[in-house]
């Protein structure tokens, strides 16, 4: 049963009035002159026997029924019989009426109405439907249900559409994630999740922050995938005729990776071009965050030379987990640069918290060389795009390592013992025992190259090395110029799966090799040409540990200077974190192409000065509040403009952005359809003839019967009350003491 | 009024109004015997503690010179040639004092007349019955001025009205002063008498026992009429109530009866059992006069049991419920 005037149901609270009258009126105590007082005064009360007696319950019941009937009569109930659905489907149709739908004189709203009508017509007759509208007064509102939730009566469609058209767009943007929670609180018609299908018809082009819809769409999907069999999102946009491209345009925006850890910086690069002759200082607007929680930062950048593609580099930390969009728009400020704000682009970054950087040492942490720490931090910060201050190295004593709560990934850079070979050997042995991920090869620094110390080192009995744990000790005597190439592992090696670029230019200076047996659970991801392991990975606790047998200390090798080292570390991180990433379908490999700043690159500061890229870190704090600065590429010996591809597109961003649809496509289980595709996929029939008159006949009958019943009950109550009054008078007469 | 009490029908005094035919017809004609020997001055229907008269043979004793020859058992002398004096029982009247409790608690009566009214009706039945067998009847209580009032026993039929004319208009009030009343009575009656106490007994058990003991040790015969209202026995109240003490002014209890019912009934039943045991332990008769039971039916049951010499308590539980409009005969 449903109600046309459901608001009147609040009047059901009025049934508390007769109940209160009944309960509280009885609170008045009857005065009883009593002789046997001594037995009452001495009696101990038994509170368990206390009972709330409902005397005169008949009168109370009739009063409650009378009030309830009156309220129900006003609420105009509808008796509905569940409409059996041949297809067994129930649709939850949610239509967007947010402020953005009022653009272009409600053009989006009208478009949504048209889409809604088509969808309504396409839904099978025997399907059951709930019709919700989002965005009116921040509330998710259900259009008044009619005689049935099913669509077999064409008048229902007309009524719904007429009611929808009467609803004007709200004055503020809506909170889709909040709306999802409220929508799930609506009682559904079908208890079976598999029968439910959710269709969201929403404005795809919100002015100001369109790509936040991607995060919203992900949230919609994540929240609804458990509640419905399928979720379809129908983005609605307006295809404007081709307009003149704006003079200032954000051609693209990319992130070096699409996953970062909280508190860590991601490097976002945007290319901007001055296609006109804008001479004033442009203003950039940067939105970061989710839909309702996005923050805006504006900054001025130096004037852009016409026709040249400039690169904006942004370093930004993300404090909160989840999907976050970065949207950059650029606009001129001069009167002659009256530009629209259509020149914008965005990228979505997922924030994860899975990476730790640990340095295992046998020395006291305070004795670790500063250079070691700085190098390790630099290497990993470069690999993942963070800053050294955020990506902090954690020195851990070897003995304490097994007790670490490694809930995720630990990447170990072994940095100890570069001076004392004894400590190196002992550390290797301990690390092997505790971690067992290393095994393999340990490199000794050049300081231990003299034979005397070598001979003193590698007598196992002198240093506690168990002979059983050492397969062989090989001395590689060579000059500092000797090259040892890192050969990629073929066959079953994970190195190929990782897509790691081989570190072909790796040069390892003179070293010793200390080889221990490999634990069975470990796997070698990369090894040297001689078969000695370079990168070993094994599972430890709930995480995975990767151990490199060579750190980046320049006395050992040129590892840190290799061009492939940073991508190598980055891929290693994602490989180790693969088990923990929230959305494995969006892999890190899909991120924007990596391009490391070369020393030849120049960076232009807001004050117009150009500095070398290698000095960027020193001047980073002086950059604009938005963290934006221009990078001028000089790879071809001059300022080479990039090709401008996206600017040539004919549609503006108010149409459904193609990259938005692509991002939505990457979400599993979320169907992104246009109206025609929706009709085709659902195999909907042809449009129905729609009547605009709502059905309202049976409810009036019920109201009449309710009123008749109410009058009957009132008469009954009068009779009962009179009898009760007489009984009370009789009782009160007997109470008087003679 | 019934014909048997026709002499009161004309006057329609207080006593006549108290004595209901539907009560008295239950006990009309029943004797109210004494369990002890009477010491009354006048000849009556009760065995006297003295020998004499010629109604019933008692025993023989040897003849002593000086004895009246008319008392000699000539027949025994002829047979056995021995001289014996033949002795006979003497039958005298026994005075009865009816004590009515006038304390405030006797005013209680919710679904029935008050306990005081019920006591007066029972007293009227007793008085009429006793006057009918020519036993002197007296009444003791308090008059309207609050003074102890004692109507001395007399056996004339016209004494019936005199018994009640001062006591019936009294409104029960105040504490129970039954012990004081008994103390006033005892010096007035040195000879054995019968005392009928009509009270609800809402006092300490030891106090009740003291009263009874004072009477029984002096040879008096005591009948304890325990007058109770059905509400006091059953305590069947439901709603929250304010119980106002009838004996102590401005003392009340606001309670939920359902919470106190179990504890109250436990104490009250213990009280009934205690009074009952103290009565039978001292050789007193006990009858429970519930105001919702017929007075006549309970008195009849008591008299039948009493006349057989039994001291078993009469609780009146099997008595017919009281009906003031009952027109049928009691027996």
Image (cartoon, grey):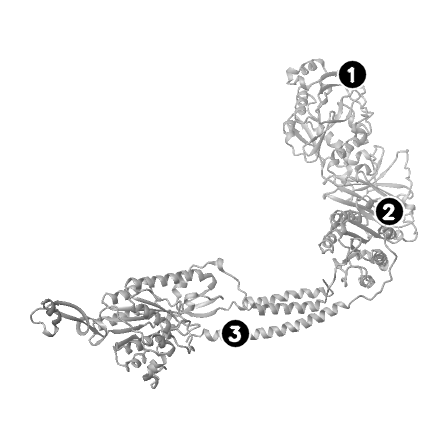
Q: Is residue B276 left or right of residue A394?
A: left
The residue where tag 3 is placed is: A727
Identify the image quadrant of the C terminus of chain A.
bottom left
| Observer-nearest of B60 and B121 | B60
| CA neighbours of label 1 inside 10 A, class few (<14), some (14 to 19), many (20+) | few
Q: Residue furthest bottom?
A: B10
Q: Which mark is residue A570?
A: none
Answer yes or no: are tags 3 and 2 on the same subunit: yes
| CA neighbours of label 2 inside 10 A, class few (<14), some (14 to 19), many (20+) | few
Secondary element under disc 1, as helix, strand or loop, is loop
Up-down relation of residue A256 to residue A116 (above or below): above
Answer yes or no: are tags 1 and 2 on the same subunit: yes
x, y (%) of residue A39? 39, 63
Q: How many marks?
A: 3
| Observer-nearest of A564 and A638 | A564
The chain containing the residue under callout 2 comes to A
| Observer-nearest of A193 and A641 | A193
x, y (%) of residue A644? 91, 42
Residue at 92% x, 46% y is A648
> Does the residue at mark 3 contact the one at mark 2 (Cβ under 8 Å)?
no
Answer yes or no: are tags 3 and 1 on the same subunit: yes
Q: Which mark is residue A658?
A: 2
The residue where tag 1 is placed is: A478
Query: Closer to the N terminus: mark 1 or mark 2?
Result: 1
> Looking at the image, can residue B206 be seen?
no
């Amino acid at each position: 049963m449903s109600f046309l005037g459901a608001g009147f149901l609040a009047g059901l609270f009025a049934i508390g009035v007769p109940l209160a009258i009944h309960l509280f009126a009885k609170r008045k105590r009857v005065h009883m002159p009593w002789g046997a007082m001594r037995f009452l005064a001495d009696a101990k009360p038994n509170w368990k026997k206390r009972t709330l007696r409902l005397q005169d319950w008949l009168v109370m019941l009739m009063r409650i029924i009378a009030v309830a009937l009156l309220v129900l009569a006003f609420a105009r109930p509808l008796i509905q019989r569940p409409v059996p659905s041949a297809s067994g489907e129930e649709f939850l149709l949610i239509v967007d009426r947010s402020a953005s739908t009022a653009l272009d004189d409600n053009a989006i709203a009208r478009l949504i109405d048209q889409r809604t009508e088509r969808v309504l017509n396409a839904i099978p007759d025997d399907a059951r439907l709930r019709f919700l509208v989002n965005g009116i007064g921040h509330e998710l509102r259900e259009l008044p249900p009619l005689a049935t939730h099913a669509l077999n009566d064409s008048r229902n469609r007309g009524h719904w559409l007429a009611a929808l058209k009467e609803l004007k767009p709200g004055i503020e943007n809506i909170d889709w994630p909040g709306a999802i929670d409220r929508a799930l609180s609506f009682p559904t018609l079908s208890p079976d999740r598999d029968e439910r299908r959710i269709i969201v018809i929403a404005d795809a082009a919100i002015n100001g922050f369109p790509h936040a819809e991607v995060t919203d769409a992900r949230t919609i999907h994540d929240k609804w995938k458990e509640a419905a069999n399928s979720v379809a999102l129908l983005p609605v946009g307006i295809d404007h005729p081709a307009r003149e491209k704006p003079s200032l345009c954000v051609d693209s925006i990319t992130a070096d990776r699409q996953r970062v850890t909280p508190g860590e910086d991601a490097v976002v690069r945007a290319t901007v071009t001055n296609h006109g002759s804008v001479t004033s200082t442009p203003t950039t607007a940067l939105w970061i965050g989710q839909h309702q929680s996005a923050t805006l930062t504006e900054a001025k950048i130096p004037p852009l030379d016409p026709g040249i593609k400039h690169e904006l580099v942004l370093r930004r930390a993300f404090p909160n987990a989840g999907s976050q969009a970065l949207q950059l728009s650029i606009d001129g400020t001069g009167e002659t640069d009256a530009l629209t704000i259509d020149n914008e682009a965005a990228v979505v970054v997922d924030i994860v918290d899975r990476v730790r950087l640990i340095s295992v040492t046998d020395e006291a942490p305070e004795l670790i060389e500063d250079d070691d720490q700085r190098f390790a931090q630099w290497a990993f910060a470069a690999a993942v795009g963070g800053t050294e201050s955020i990506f902090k190295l954690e020195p851990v004593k070897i003995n304490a390592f097994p007790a670490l709560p490694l809930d995720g990934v630990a990447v170990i850079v072994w940095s100890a013992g570069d001076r004392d070979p004894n400590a190196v050997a002992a550390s290797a042995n301990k690390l092997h025992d505790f971690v067992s991920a290393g095994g393999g090869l340990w490199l000794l620094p050049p300081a231990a190259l003299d034979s005397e110390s070598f001979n003193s080192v590698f007598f196992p009995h002198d240093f506690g090395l168990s002979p059983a744990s050492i397969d062989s000790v090989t001395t590689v005597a060579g000059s500092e110029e000797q090259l040892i190439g890192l050969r990629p592992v073929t066959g079953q090696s994970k190195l190929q799966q990782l897509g790691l670029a081989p570190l072909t230019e790796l040069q390892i200076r003179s070293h010793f090799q200390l080889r221990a047996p490999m634990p069975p659970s470990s796997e070698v991801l990369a090894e040297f040409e001689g078969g000695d392991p370079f990168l070993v990975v094994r599972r430890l606790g709930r995480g995975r540990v990767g151990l490199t047998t060579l750190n980046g200390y320049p006395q050992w090798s040129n590892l840190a200077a290799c061009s492939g080292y940073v991508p190598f570390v980055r891929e290693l991180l994602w490989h180790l974190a693969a088990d923990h990433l929230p959305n494995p379908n969006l892999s890190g490999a899909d991120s924007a192409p990596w391009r490391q700043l070369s020393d030849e690159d120049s960076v232009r500061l807001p004050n117009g000065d150009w500095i070398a890229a290698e000095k960027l870190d020193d001047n980073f704090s002086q950059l604009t509040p938005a963290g934006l600065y221009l990078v001028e590429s000089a790879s071809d010996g001059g300022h080479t403009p990039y090709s401008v591809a996206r600017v040539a597109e004919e549609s503006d961003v108010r149409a459904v952005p193609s990259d938005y649809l692509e991002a939505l496509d990457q979400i599993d289980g979320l169907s992104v359809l246009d109206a025609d595709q929706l009709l085709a996929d659902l195999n909907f029939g042809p449009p129905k003839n729609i009547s605009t008159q709502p059905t309202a006949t049976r409810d009036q009958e019920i109201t009449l019967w309710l009123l008749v019943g109410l009058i009957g009950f009132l008469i009954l109550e009068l009779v009962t009350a009179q009898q009760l009054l007489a009984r009370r008078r009789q009782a009160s007469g007997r109470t008087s003491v003679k | 009024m019934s014909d048997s009490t026709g002499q009161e029908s004309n006057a329609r005094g207080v006593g006549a109004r108290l004595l209901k035919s539907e009560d008295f017809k239950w006990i009309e004609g029943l004797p109210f015997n004494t369990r002890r020997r009477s010491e009354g001055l006048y000849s009556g229907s009760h065995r006297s503690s003295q020998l004499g008269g010629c109604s019933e043979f008692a025993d023989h004793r040897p003849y002593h010179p000086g004895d009246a020859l008319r008392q000699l058992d000539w027949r025994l002398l002829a047979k056995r040639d021995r001289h014996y004096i033949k002795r006979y029982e003497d039958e005298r009247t026994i005075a009865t004092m009816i004590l009515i409790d006038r304390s405030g608690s006797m005013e209680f009566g919710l679904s029935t007349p008050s306990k005081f009214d019920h006591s007066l009706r029972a007293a009227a039945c007793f008085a009429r019955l006793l006057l009918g067998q020519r036993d002197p009847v007296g009444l003791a209580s308090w008059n309207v001025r609050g003074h102890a009032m004692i109507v001395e026993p007399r056996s004339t039929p016209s004494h019936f009205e005199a018994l009640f004319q001062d006591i019936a208009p009294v409104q029960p009030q105040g504490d129970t002063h039954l012990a004081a009343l008994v103390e006033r009575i005892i010096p007035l009656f040195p000879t054995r008498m019968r005392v009928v106490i009509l009270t609800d007994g809402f006092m300490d058990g030891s106090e009740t026992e003291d009263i009874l003991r004072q009477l029984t040790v002096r040879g008096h015969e005591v009948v304890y009429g325990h007058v109770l209202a059905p509400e006091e026995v059953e305590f069947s109240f439901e709603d929250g109530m304010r119980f106002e003490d009838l004996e102590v002014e401005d003392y009340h209890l606001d309670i939920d009866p359902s919470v106190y019912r179990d504890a109250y009934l436990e104490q009250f039943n213990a009280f009934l059992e205690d009074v009952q045991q103290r009565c039978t332990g001292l050789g007193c008769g006990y009858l429970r006069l519930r105001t919702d039971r017929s007075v006549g039916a309970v008195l009849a049951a008591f008299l039948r049991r009493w006349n057989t010499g039994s001291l078993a308590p009469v609780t009146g539980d099997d008595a017919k419920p009281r009906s003031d409009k009952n027109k049928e005969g009691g027996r």
